[in-house]
Amino acid sequence: MERLLVLRLDTIGVTAEAQLNGVPLARCGPGGGAVTVPIHEYTLSGANDLQLVIQPPLPGKPAAPAPLLSDGQRGASLRLLLPRIGQLAHPENARTLAQIDWAPAAGEVTEMPATLRQTVELPIAFPRWRWFDAPLVPEPETLLPQAASYLQGLALGLARGDPEPLVLAARLRFEELAQAYQRAMADDVGRLRLQVQQWHAKAPLKPPMPTLETLRLRPLAGGRLLECLAPDGQPALHSPVAGGGRIAWPLRLAVIEGRFYVIR
């Protein structure tokens, strides 16, 4: 693909989260820095809802409102960029399609978390992705037993070094990512298989089994997607790996006729 549509999030002095059409896509901490992510699979043809959330709660945790007194050194910026062909995804080398800035003056008090929103019309026509039409889940907590059992099956496969349960569960995601970025689905599937097999060969994967007590279902996109999280807000499906560290497999589920589908 010659051109990538990306979100770029910059912060200093605060934590901020970038959301597109109700789905969190990037988070950056108070130490300052930038995060850039491609977003094709979360876009709509026509109007798109872009949000910048300042001081968001941990994923899956309720927000605790609190005032924040600015010292004039805090700020966040969210840009929707279309880089020029052959250029890096940086504001200097890209067309800015939308921008949201937050930079309060010293002494200004803002109630946190704060959300800034902008509607943007995109000049690129994408397909209508399946998750936009997924049924709403009004009470995600009622699905915890079924979701925990579903994830346990995926975790068991990984613990055996077998990526196939995850490959089958994520078939719709693989299909749409291949379409979104004009690449071969078989390549993405092959990378996942190789990743699991290589890590397992170094040291057996040991993903914790999600349970009713440890699994959190975070509703996204107005309840059309359920993000599977551990109590610390990280992906529920994860494992320690050889040499230290952790590998994670983020899962965002749609629920269609009582069945779970890894759709993002």
Image (spheres, grey):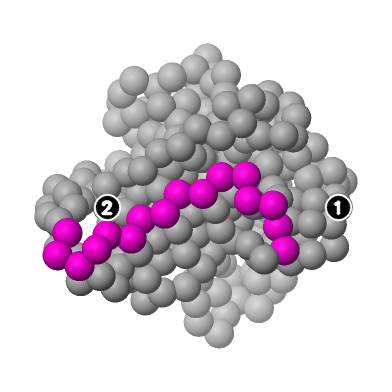
- Disc 1 from disc 2: Cα separation: 36 Å
Locate residue 23, reporting x and y percent: 48, 40
**108 or 64, nearer to the observer:** 108
Residue 174, located in which quarter of the rendered image?
A: top right
**Considering only vertical position in the picture, is 31 above or below 106?**
below
Residue, far top: 257
* In the displayed structure image, the side of residue 138 where residue 107 appears, left or right: left
Query: Disc 2 on helix, strand or loop?
Result: loop
* In the displayed structure image, the side of residue 97 where residue 118 appears, left or right: left
Q: Amino acid at mark 2?
A: Pro
Q: Which residues are magenta?
A: 93-108
Residue, far front: 105
Locate residue 218, reporting x and y percent: 37, 39
**250 or 113, nearer to the observer:** 113
Locate residue 37, reporting x and y percent: 61, 56
**98 or 253, nearer to the observer:** 98
**Considering only vertical position in the picture, is 45 above or below 85?**
above
Query: Disc 1 on helix, strand or loop?
Result: loop
Image mark for residue 57: 2
Circle 2 residues within 10 Å: few <14, some 14–19, many ≥20:
some
Q: Earlier in the sequence, mark 1 or mark 2?
A: 1
Image mark for residue 2: 1
